[in-house]
Amino acid sequence: MIIEDGVGRDDELHHEVITMNTNDTTSTNSTNSATQTFETRNGPITITGYGASSEVGRSAFIIEDSKRKILVEGGLKIMPGDELTLAPDGLKQRIHELNAAVLSHAHVDHSGYLPALYENGYFGKLYMTTPTLDIVQVLWADHLKIEGSRHWSPAGMERAIDNTVTMKYHTKKEIVEGVTIEFFNAGHILGSGMILIDWDGFLILFTGDINDNQTPLFEGFEIPDVEVDVLISESTNGCRHVTPREEVNTDFIQEIKNTLDKGHKVIIPCFALGRSQELLTVLTKHIKDYPIYVDGMIRTMNALTEKYLNPNWIDEPLLNRMREEGIFSPFRYENVIEISPENFDRTHDFRRYLGQLDEPVIILTTSGMMEPSPLHSHLRFSARKPETLIAVVGYQAEGTKGRAILEGQRKITLSVDWNREEEVEIKARVMRFHYSGHTSADGIKDLIDAVKPKQIYFIHGGVEEQDDLRQKLSNGIVPVSLEIGKTEILAQ
Ligand SMILES: [Zn+2]
Ligand SMILES: [Zn+2]
């Protein structure tokens, strides 16, 4: 595994690696009550899940009638530790039947399988937002480096890119005869979209991953001004309390300032896309007097995000700040230093130097779950010092080094100096800050109140989370949990 400059096990690939029980069928499903009567042109309209159905990961759904078959998402499931990714279950056999494919956002659990379409008999188009195409190209290339051609090869990737049709928010496009789609800002990551599907007039709103939190780049997900027949909603957080950003940010900045003022180091292991840009935007606002080093794939994702810092993709608060401060990017201040070959002849040596240096600095680096990456070079010396702060800002999946460190394991084997393993005693303070990229239950409730669906389906969540939500949200309608391979009739 390559660990130089962020091309190693990076963490978009680990995003949302929430391993959940997929076999538990205790949820209270009722298929029949869900079907709506609608004058369908080509028989019943149905949905079948091939992943992210009573689990998180490998999102893939086919919505179809007798004439038209549309794939929504095609992701991989990231497994704990060194286990290999899983493809959607049963999708491959149906690829040749598909007429169109749509992607909500770039995360690998939604996009990682899509190149395989073009190596298994699919000749149609792939629809996504403009930033999503930029991001998936980086993530797909990274996936190839890590897992090789297990699911698809570089040729499939190139064909997927060639066949992609990009869209802005709020524009409609007919993707097969009688079926149009439109994206709405999902507030989750750059370019993320809820998808409104108009199927001969039958309206299906597919949330993808949505976030109702006000974050520096987004003011929470956008609610389409429309009433729909069916809502297909993510359910990742269930009814878990989601701490408002203001609260988390205040604690985060306070703790970092205290550590720096005492002369110590802060290390922030972070997902390259999304959380990194969010936190860097917060850090550059509040921390002006100390260096902020940025390492790993975060650099690529910062540059990519900069292309889209305009009202088409980013919400007003950040754009206002940029106008007021007269800056073109919230990631480039005098105290922000990228650990890149352009800045340092030997990045690896610089990491070692920085590790041995006793100075108050912030290091924002991949990987978010503390897997082999530039982070390990930074931890090698700094984590041995009790004064160092390791700020945990994302989910740490079972089986990852991040989970072990968070749970108090003190002896950790790191990959340093070109994959040489070294056991290091972690004496640093490890603190967790509760950031979430997903909506609260109240967010889903607001969405339901606004779009007034006649039926609701849950995807992208565990059985327990969905049961909790079902209890909280049931108001005449009982939301149905999709199960892998089980077809639900949306309309007939
Ligand atoms: Zn996501
Ligand atoms: Zn997801």
Image (cartoon, rainbow, N blue to C red):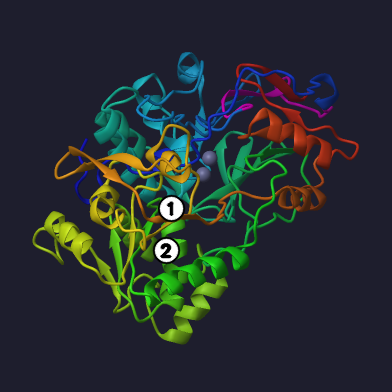
Q: Is residue 227 left or right of residue 186?
A: right
Query: Which residue was labeled with disc 1?
Result: 130
Above or below for 120 versus 368: above
Q: Secondary structure at mark 1?
A: helix
Q: Give the residues drawn in magenta, as a range.
A: 36-54
Question: Residue 263: where, in percent of width, then height?
Answer: 33, 74
| Residue at 54 percent of width and 38 percent of height | 175
Callout 2 touching callout 1 (CB < 8 Å): yes
**Residue most extreme to the left:** 345
Question: Residue 414: where, in percent of width, then height?
Answer: 26, 41
Task: Kindly identify the amino acid type of the residue bearing the numbered disc 1.
Answer: Thr
Labels 2 and 1: the sequence-earlier one: 1
Badge 2 residue CB within 8 Å of ligand 1: no
Above or below for 20 versus 310: above
From the viewer's side, name the closer residue of 433 and 296. 433
Residue 162: name its quadrant: top left
Above or below for 26 versus 243: above
Question: Residue 213: where, in percent of width, then height?
Answer: 63, 59
Badge 1 residue CB within 8 Å of ligand 1: no
Look at the image and tell me whether residue 164 can be seen.
no
In terms of secondary structure, what is the magenta stretch mainly? Answer: loop
Query: Which residue was labeled with disc 2?
Result: 308
From the viewer's side, name the closer residue of 105 and 82. 82
Calculate the distance from the C-alpha at mark 2 to the C-alpha at mark 1: 9 Å
**Residue most extreme to the top:** 93
Query: Label 1: how many residues lie within 10 Å, few (<14), some (14-19) or many (20+)?
Result: some
